[in-house]
Amino acid sequence: MDRATIINNLQGTMISKEPIIGVCIGNGRSGQQASFGGADLLLALNAGRFRMSGVTSIAAMLPFSNSNDMVFEFAHHEVIPRVDNIPIIFGACAQDPTYTHEELIEKLVHAGFDGINNFPSVSLIDGQYREFLEENGEGFEKEVDLLRMASEKGIFTVGFAVTLEEAIEMAKANVDVLCLHFGWTYINRPSEDELEPYVDRQITKANLVFEKILEIKPDIIPTIYGGSIVRDPEVMSRFYNETSAIGYIGGSVFEVTPVENSIKDATKRFKSVNRVMELEKENEVLKQHLMGKKGVTTVIGNSQVIKELSDLIIKISNYDSNVLVKGENGSGKDLVVKAIHYNSNRAIYPIIKVNCASIPKNLIESELFGHEKGAFVGADKQHIGRFESANHGTLFLDHITELDLDVQAKVLRVIQDNEFERVGGDETIHIDVRILSTTNKDVYKEIEEKRFREDLFYLLNVITLELPPLRSHKEDIPLYVSTFMEVINEKHNSNISVSSRVMNAFMNYDWPGNVRELKNALERGAILCDRDLLDIQFLPATFYGLIPIDDTVNYIKNSSMVIEKELILSELLKTQWNQTRVAEKLGMTRRTLYNKIKKYELEKKVL
């Protein structure tokens, strides 16, 4: 099965609202069973062979045998002859000294394998042994080089990665599937009390990794790798609903999950965990909850202007009209665009971002519309453009007014006709894409000075959202500080709070860089801070000479009610309004919680 067919089949699975399931196998029988259960990919790994022999999969990382020869032996004779309708991916040891990368790729293609991935991987090794491997040129970069070469040869690739840095390298190598490996196969399942916070941390990591790799390669397929931690489908559903993951790859979990003791039934069970089952519910609160779980990707604030903006976002999200978001730099235009997308019926499909100001003019047309092999010097393979990658989803044109006039004319045609041709091609590509665009310029002035097409402006500007600068709603600063510090503390494994002097300075500052400047100031302070209290000396010099609005006013105290209300509401949402559990978690009696719910006028119906 060639690469294009595999990718097309996987895209069909995504369109049908099913997760992509990859099963790691060690013999022909398990491959057949996974096939019957509906698996999308079979990964032939030496770990699977060891597991089938009754040896723990840690043996896969030890020098028991030549890994590549072992995989060739069982997969070529047992798996390939029994399975003919599912791609079989070869688990390759890139550090094998008996084969060059080119020889290894040629051998697996000749043997009938449909793709390649990096396993065993040094990404699962740490300490001095890992350092030794890296120092001697036998580290992770060798795996990246192998998959890059395979990709250049037109072979389907699945890249395993554990860290953000490794994932970035795999995305740059142009792998088709990125599998984020949490090491779940070799840790014990957390206790019930520890499970939720543990999964929360992994979801935060997944969001960070997937957001970055999708910026590098928008058409990459993000998946996760797991073991016993996801035996409960509800845990897996959280990853589908709260991250960009659209697939799951596992090995031992399909064999040990007690579903009729059958790999076939276990595969069916995981295949049935629909990643969009929450999104399909026409419940606005669940959509808000989803947005919140994506990180700080929604519009937060208690000021009247932000509440009105939030209401407008909810109102327009499920209409397919194009939206132009205007505002100063750093005012949160990206977050508004994401909020619109994740609140819409298109949220099950990708949101593809194009920074029109950062792509060179000679490349922007190819980036937007793609190109065919041979279309120009250096076009050694077909490239899928951003419009095509965003099909059925949302195309986010950031800094839209920076587009060259010639490209504006072509974008105009795509929006009008919903079709285009790749550069150097004659095949007409039909698409269904919603356009969300942003600008920090006066568009009418750009039109007047002939730098922006008026007809394109009216197509993009069906609805306009004007974002207020932070200086116009400073009452939201305490809530922003609380929200950002929670994320920063999680990111840096710290427990830093903000002093009243800092809050007073923040309230007296005009924030020319808006919310982005606030977030950056807090993160800089948290990094430089050598204690648990962030004070004025850890902030940029800009804040040193500020005179507090009123030294007798403690803005933290005044904002505590707002923060407490948000905290209680958040916990109630997490527990489906289980007041006993929330009271225990917040360290208060149930009666105290009841009084606070009444005080803040929180009603279950608003959830």
Image: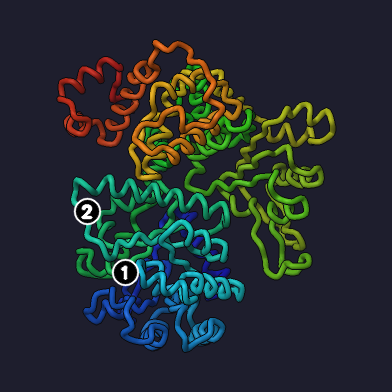
Q: SS class of the residue under badge 1? A: loop
Give amino acid for label 2: Pro
The answer to whether residue 368 is visible is yes
Vertical order, 526 against 568 (above or below): below
Report the residue at 39% width, 59% height from top.
224
Number of on-image labels: 2
Near-viewer residue (549 or 269): 549
Task: Please give the residue where the numbered disc 1 appears in the rendered image.
Answer: 251
Dividing the image into 4 quarters, which one contains the C terminus?
top left
Q: SS class of the residue under badge 2? A: loop
Q: Position of residue 270 (x, y in %)?
A: 32, 59
Q: Position of residue 296 (x, y in %)?
A: 45, 37
Q: Residue 190 has which mark?
A: 2
Vertical order, 337 against 475 (above or below): below
Vertical order, 485 against 157 (above or below): above
Left or right: 457 as drawn, with respect to 396? right
